[in-house]
Amino acid sequence: QVQLVESGGRLVQVGQSLRLDCASNKVIDSFDQMVWYRQGPEKQREFVAVIFLTGRTNYSDSVQGRFTVSRNALNNEFYLSMDNLKVEDTAVYYCGARYRGVDYWGQGTQVTVSS
């Protein structure tokens, strides 16, 4: 069973930066992919970023150039670094991982961007 725990969400101002962490109880090099999704107020959950086992990354158009997904195999953690935050980035952010064909999710962490 994979357990993922997000941390780092908080209230920030427009233009500021923030890093979200996702800690795993499994070796992250065993994951096919690690993802970040978000769900804003009264919105559906949407894709934000992915990092594959190969190290290749992909981002949604709305965060491309501002957000960076990375990983640290030594700590079994992966991250979402967010720069130049906007009000529309306000959401609950979820990390997820695919392990042996099954998707696992964390409980979410709230990011609020205030103007």
Image (cartoon, helix red, strand yellow):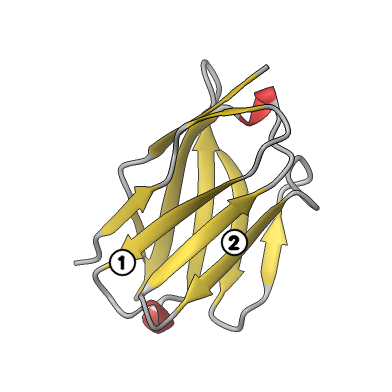
Name the residue: 41% across, 63% down: 97
User: How many numbered marks have been drawn onto this rendered protein structure?
Assistant: 2
Q: Position of residue 94 (x, y in %)?
A: 43, 45
Residue 45 in view: no
Q: Position of residue 78 (x, y in %)?
A: 47, 66
Res. 50 mark: 2
Question: 20 or 91: which is nearer to us?
Answer: 20
For disc 2, the neighbor class at 10 Å (few under 14, some 14 to 19, many from 20) is: many
Name the residue: 41% across, 67% down: 98
Q: CA distance from mark 2 to mark 1?
A: 16 Å
Name the residue: 32% across, 80% down: 27
Quadrant occupied by the N terminus:
bottom left
Q: Answer with mark 2 or mark 1, whichever residue precedes in sequence.
A: 1
The amino acid sitting under disc 2 is: Val
The vertical placement of 94 against 87, above or below, is: below
Mark 2 touching mark 1, by CB under 8 A? Answer: no
**Residue 68 located left or right of residue 2:** right
The vertical placement of 14 against 61, above or below, is: above
Quadrant occupied by the C terminus:
top right
Q: Which element carries disc 2, helix, strand or loop?
A: strand
Q: Which element carries disc 1, helix, strand or loop?
A: strand
The amino acid sitting under disc 1 is: Ser
Which residue is tagged 1?
A: 24
Residue 32 in view: yes
Question: 24 or 100: which is nearer to us?
Answer: 24
Name the residue: 75% across, 49% down: 66
